[in-house]
């Protein structure tokens, strides 16, 4: 088993969706829970993240992405009775921004 398979298996074992988007806003990875969660959109890996977001969401994502380019590591974007959704910067070992991921947590309530 190679490193990529191990990492993918670890992320697939997480019970919440994880979506990675690169700096060009292209979806590059979705764990199994994300594939199920976004199944209505079909196969969106390799597609622009804005393919499945409205203009309001696009503006929010672009604003938060700019904050991440300025050093922000994570921002809460949704907090409701179903879940919390965070947008998190993904950086390489040198601190260069590679893109961002969307991750879910259960609500506090």
Image: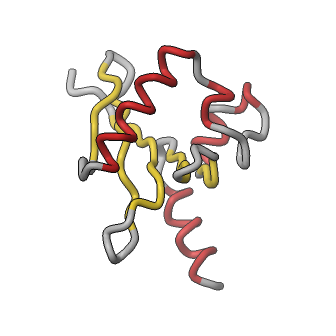
41 shown above or below 98 = above
Q: Front-most of 85 and 36? A: 85
50 shown above or below 66 = above
Q: Position of residue 95 (x, y in %)?
A: 31, 69
Which quarter of the figure has residue 107?
top left
Tally the numbered discs: 0
Q: Front-most of 31 and 65? A: 65
Q: Identify which residue is drawn at 38% across, 20% down.
A: 82
Side (left or right) of 27 relative to 19: right
39 shown above or below 87 = above
13 shown above or below 65 = below
Q: How is the image coloured?
A: secondary structure
Side (left or right) of 42 relative to 98: right
Which quadrant holds the C terminus? top left
Q: Position of residue 58 (x, y in %)?
A: 51, 24
Q: Identify which residue is drawn at 53% across, 70% down.
A: 7
Q: Identify which residue is drawn at 57% across, 43% down.
A: 25
């Amino acid at each position: 088993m190679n490193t990529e398979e191990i990492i993918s298996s670890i992320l697939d074992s997480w019970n919440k969706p994880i979506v990675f988007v690169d700096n060009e806003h292209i979806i590059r990875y979705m764990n199994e829970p994300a594939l199920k969660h976004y199944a209505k959109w079909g196969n969106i890996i390799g597609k622009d993240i804005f393919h499945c977001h409205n203009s309001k969401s696009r503006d929010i994502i672009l604003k938060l992405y700019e904050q991440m380019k300025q050093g922000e590591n994570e921002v809460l974007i949704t907090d409701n009775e179903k879940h919390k959704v965070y947008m998190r910067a993904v950086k390489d070992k040198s601190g260069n921004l590679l893109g961002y991921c969307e991750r879910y947590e259960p609500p506090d309530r």
